Image (cartoon, grey):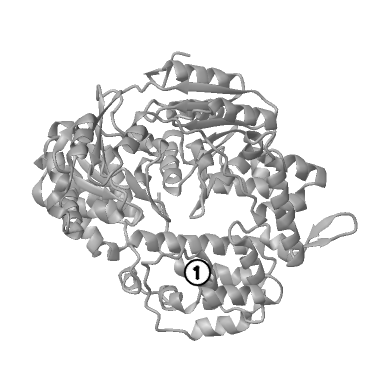
Amino acid sequence: MKEFQGLKLDRFQEEAIHSIENNHSVVVSAATGTGKTLIADYLIDKYLKQGKKIVYTAPIKALSNQKYSDFKRQYGEEKVGILTGDVTINHNAPLRIMTTEIYRNMLLSHDPELDDVMYIVFDEIHYLGDFERGTVWEESIIFSKEHTRFLCLSATIPNAKQFANWISYIKKHQVDVVLEKKRAVPLKQSFYDTETGFCELKEIKELKKLDKHPKYKYNRRRFFDELKRTKRLGHLDLLSEMKDKLPAIYFCFSRMETQNKAVILAKKNNYLTSNEQSQLSSIVRERLKTTDESVLHLDSTKMLRECLSKGIGFHNAGVLPVLKEIVETLFSQGLIKVLFATETFAVGINMPAKTVVFDSMEKFDGINFRYLKSKEFFQLAGRAGRRGIDKVGFVVVVIERRTMDINHVERIVQDDKESLQSQFKLSFNTILNLIHRHTEKEQQVILESNFYTYQQAGRGGANRIKASFEKKKKKLIKEGYIVHGLNDLELTEKGLFSMRIYSNELLVGELFTGRFSQLFTNKEILLLVGRISYEERKNHKFKSKKRDISNAAFKKIKDNTVLYNYFRKNQLYLLEQFLVEWYEGCDFPDLLELSNLSEGDIVRYIRQIIDLLQQIQHATLSDDLKNKIRDIVTKIDRDVVSVRF
């Protein structure tokens, strides 16, 4: 095949399609922007026409939502479904879009809806190397049905052959590797020193040697304050020199910076013609017409609309989903000329620009500030250059030479040489499922099937995994999740319940099985689940005047050592006013007054609570608990947090 959907296929696309035609799995390792998604489009088109079933997984819900909308337009509503922690639509459709976590959970529970899936597309498969979430990807491959084939899409994977060989080894079928390093639109890198402007890296190195900071020798604070001021306004000068290289995505590794920089630029520049302003206003009004009216009066909404009217936008996880969708629509239609975004904008979403700017080469990863990895850099840089529009894509790296390790930066931007490394870890949930659904012999085979053991061949990888399994199994026996049956180990009621809970499974199991499952009121359930779902941050603050419900719930669990120790440390009252007032029907702007969380973080938090509540509803045998949870979800799943398509 030389063409598909009116597009001439590149060599690597032809190779991948040939593998699909031969019913092989295929790992496609190709630079961002080369056209990997066209291969997935071909696979989906081929099997939908044959009446076969396909699953498309993505690492983030936003990408799942976007793919659902795209495929629904292309193939029709009846042929496409979506399953995420937020929404389930048409769950038995021939093409189902889902997060990788959902797919893995369905596999572990032996969901019959996956029995006849022909192919699964793993978008952004390099997430398998993610420290926190990588295990989900490995287990998704390990537990997939024997007849299922894989299309694994990723930016450059230097050890793609090793990865493919592992899949072939454990799944017993041919796995081809297709590589493409050359981009359809080549990239041109340049550097922008916050003091001297555009210059070559070798010039920056020379300047760094000459920097002695004499006037700041005895006043370091003044020196760093001056650097911050220069950095805060530096984007104005940079962008003023790039008017012929727009649209641009300006990546910042701080939500606040995306908004601050957008507002500052909007006060100085207007990038839109009167005709473009009219188009933009029409789209924004139409999108907001069906939105909760309270959203229109939020300061963040007003701030974003003001920026958008000048062709400037910002996009980060703290922005309400409906506003992010508006930004994505406007950007895709060329009505945003400068978009300030955090790195999540680059995950899978096919929205390239002519130029990509890096505000910094350092990011906070939740623990420490660190330099970007080369894979992260090239993932973001790959958004530069629009195929069929630009002859070259521009990548600009902002450098603060006085404080940065220039040699380290140089190594990052040269090439993506980081191999994909397993981060496999056994969860209690996986162990419960293994014991319940597999013989001891099958358990041993599965424990040896992970990518970590394959990579550590001859270096004790399997022994480490097996030791972890035995240690956690003993804990599960000790705490009453597993017992010795007549012939083998068996799960107790608590074990069977926790087998269907996919995070904090032991804590949730203690709370909602046995005598506890009948004890709690609706508000107490919401508060307990809300506290477990809450991700602690040092800068988070909540108003916490109310304690009645917290005290009542705590009294009911104080005799359970596990629960007592957890909720003594993670006190319930901190979230009581916030959660109970939302449950009782307060408006979204009023909810914002009860904490310093951003709008987007609040929506995400409430969705996480709903997700865990629905897991409990699915896992419990108690009709009383099921009814209580149904009532709670109805009360808290309101317009602002609902997902709409």
Q: Residue furthest top?
A: 2
Image position, residue 275 (x, y; %): 12, 40
State the image coordinates of residue 566 (x, y, percent, origin top left).
57, 72
Residue projecting furthest to the right: 486
Dot 1 amino acid type: Gly
Q: State left or right for residue 366 relative to residue 160.
A: left
Task: Tell me if residue 154 comes above or below residue 266 in the rendering.
Answer: above
How dense is the environment of label 1, judged by Cα within 10 Å: few (below 14), some, or many (20 and up)?
Answer: many
Is residue 639 in view? no
378 or 385: nearer the viewer: 378
Residue 82 percent across, percent down from the top left? 50, 46
Q: In the rendered image, is residue 211 in sight?
A: yes
Task: In this rendered view, identify the residue nearer to me: 29 or 303.
Answer: 29
Q: Looking at the image, is 8 positioned above or below residue 518? A: above
Question: Which residue does the image show at 71% across and 73% down from the upper left?
Answer: 514
**Label 1 belongs to which residue?**
530
> As drawn, is 116 to the left or to the right of 181?
right
Helix, strand or loop at disc 1? helix
Taking the spot 56% from the left edge, 81% from the top edge, the residue there is 553
Query: Residue at left 56%, top 64%?
Result: 613
Give the image location of residue 377, x and y in percent.
Answer: 36, 37
Front residue of 602/158: it is: 158
Q: Is residue 604 left or right of residue 310?
A: right
Quarter holding residue 402: top left
Image: 429 above or below 41: below
Residue 336 appears in which quarter of the rendering?
top left
Q: How many marks?
A: 1
Left or right for 450, reference 633: right
